[in-house]
Image (spheres, grey):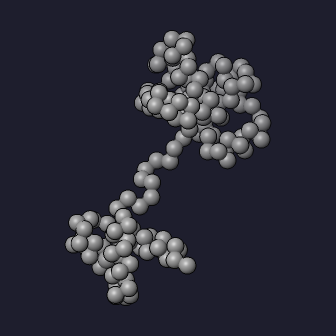
Amino acid sequence: MARIPMSDAKLAALKESGTTNPHAQDVHDPAFSQSDFFDPRDLVQVRYEMLRRVRTEGQSIAQTTSSFGVSRPTFYKAQSDFAHAGLVGLLPTKRGPRGAHKITAEVLGFIEQVRINDPGRDPQTLTEDIATRFGLAVHRRTVERALARSKKKRP
């Protein structure tokens, strides 16, 4: 098992920045177990060193993924991200959709206009109206969230 340095300040900084390696215990590379410089809790450092081992030292991908405790798809994704964005590409990103992607400004305007004309109209009926008008299948909760967001934006 990798030796984990006990710097609470660094761990706090890693947690705050969202770059803590959730699988630090799986890193078995000798450099991470024999050095205070290498920290298996530092996700960016682990990913970079993993890529460096393959690229500059010629280590096999299979051996590298095993000693760094990652899968081959994870390695290839890190390699691709690094090739496209450099070191910034190794930073973790939020997965999934970023914000409301079905409720466009046009759809939101429609929802708000319908609510002005018929304040008692329920979100389920609004989803049916949206499907009829725009051909979009949205969930009732999506409409409720859009309404809540639009209320927050109003002064």
Classify 32 as above or below 98.
above
Q: Position of residue 109 (x, y in %)?
A: 36, 73
| Along the viewing direction, whichever of 144 and 117 lies nearer the viewer | 117
Q: How many marks?
A: 0
Q: Position of residue 81 (x, y in %)?
A: 47, 32
Q: Residue furthest top?
A: 58
| Residue 78 seen by the camera | no
Instruction: State which quadrant residue 50 falls in.
Output: top right
Residue occupying the point 54% across, 13% down: 56
Quarter of the N terminus within the rendering: top right
| Along the viewing direction, whichever of 132 and 36 lies nearer the viewer | 132
Quarter of the C terminus within the rendering: bottom right
Residue occupying the point 43% across, 74% down: 147
Residue occupying the point 66% across, 19% down: 31
Q: Position of residue 7 (x, y in %)?
A: 78, 36
Position of 22 compared to 130: left or right?
right
Position of 6 compared to 80: left or right?
right
| Residue 89 seen by the camera | yes
Residue occupying the point 57% across, 26% down: 48
